Image (tube, rainbow, N blue to C red):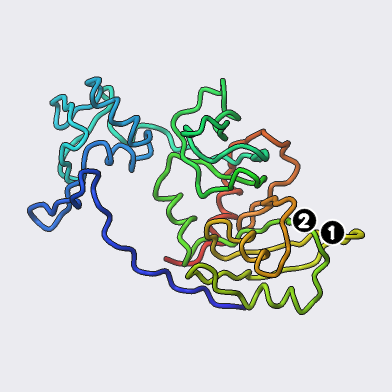
Amino acid sequence: MRPRRPPANPPARARPGGGRAAPAAGGGVRHGLARVLSKAGLCSRTEAARWIAAGRVSVDGRTVRDPEFPIQAGRQQVRVDGQPLDAAPRIYLMLNKPRGLVTTVQDEQGRETVYRCFDGAGLPWLAPVGRLDKASEGLLLFSNDPQWAAALMDPATGPDKTYHVQVDGIPEASMLAAFCAGIEDEGEFLAARAVNLLRTGEKTSWLEVTLDEGRNRHIRRLLAAFDLQVLRLVRIGIGGLRLGELPKGQWRMLQMEDRRQLEAAAGPG
């Protein structure tokens, strides 16, 4: 079994104004109010700024209209419409993403997004847990629990992800082994944890590919290095959770057993 590569130390994240989160007295760190709402899983940061400007948010009982108003975690009481940040119930669901939708709330090019699948459902704000590109299909998770989502997306400890991939060729066993050995592409190391040949046609074949971390267009770039074009890419599993018979474009809430399957597949932090 190929060991996971430790994640690189990320640089300090800059604040929207160009500065970084300011240190606070007592060793804490202050973050802008809009970011605090977003990190609580209530909404996007853009939507949080709208709520704040509309006077829906208070800090220690006082209405605040500045999205960058500094908040120190655990020291100040933030409420939205009079309700504390932790009042919203946590929601966890899975979607069978159709091909042709982008994984974002709003697309600057006007393309349809995955949120179309939730029209009329009356769901609160939910963020995607990871991504599938426009041409990819299959299992995509959503939640308003940022800590749970972060644990699943951590490249060092998150669960493996399994894909069924149709390609325009029939790779030999040596090539399957090379997919697992990995390549360098644009300064990134790309490899599969496991690859199996599922079935073949005259000129195409289906592979089962398992990744223990997912970089941008990971599988497409890896296979392109061996002159294989991806014709279809369907994510069928995350950890022990499988897409199953969920119809395309449909979603369902995760049950406790579903969450246990995901969390059991994640390594210790």
Type of the residue with mark 2? Gln
Q: CA distance from mark 1 to mark 2?
A: 7 Å
Residue depicted at x 17% and y 48%: 30
Q: Residue furthest left?
A: 25
Q: Are marks 1 and 2 in contact (CB under 8 Å)?
A: yes
Q: Earlier in the sequence, mark 1 or mark 2?
A: 2
Residue depicted at x 58% and y 56%: 217
Q: Nearer the viewer, residue 47 or 133?
A: 133
| x then y, percent, for residue 18 | 21, 48
| x then y, percent, for residue 203 | 88, 60
Q: The C terminus is located in which quarter?
A: bottom left
Crowdedness of circle 2 by 10 Å Cα count: few (<14), some, many (20+)?
Answer: many
Crowdedness of circle 1 by 10 Å Cα count: few (<14), some, many (20+)?
Answer: some
Q: Is residue 119 left or right of residue 5?
A: right
Type of the residue with mark 1? Thr
| x then y, percent, for residue 207 | 76, 62
User: Where does label 2 land, which residue?
Assistant: 166
Image disc number at residue 204: 1
Name above or below for residue 160 compared with residue 6: above
Q: The N terminus is located in which quarter?
A: bottom right
Q: Nearer the viewer, residue 20 or 26?
A: 20
Q: Residue furthest right?
A: 202
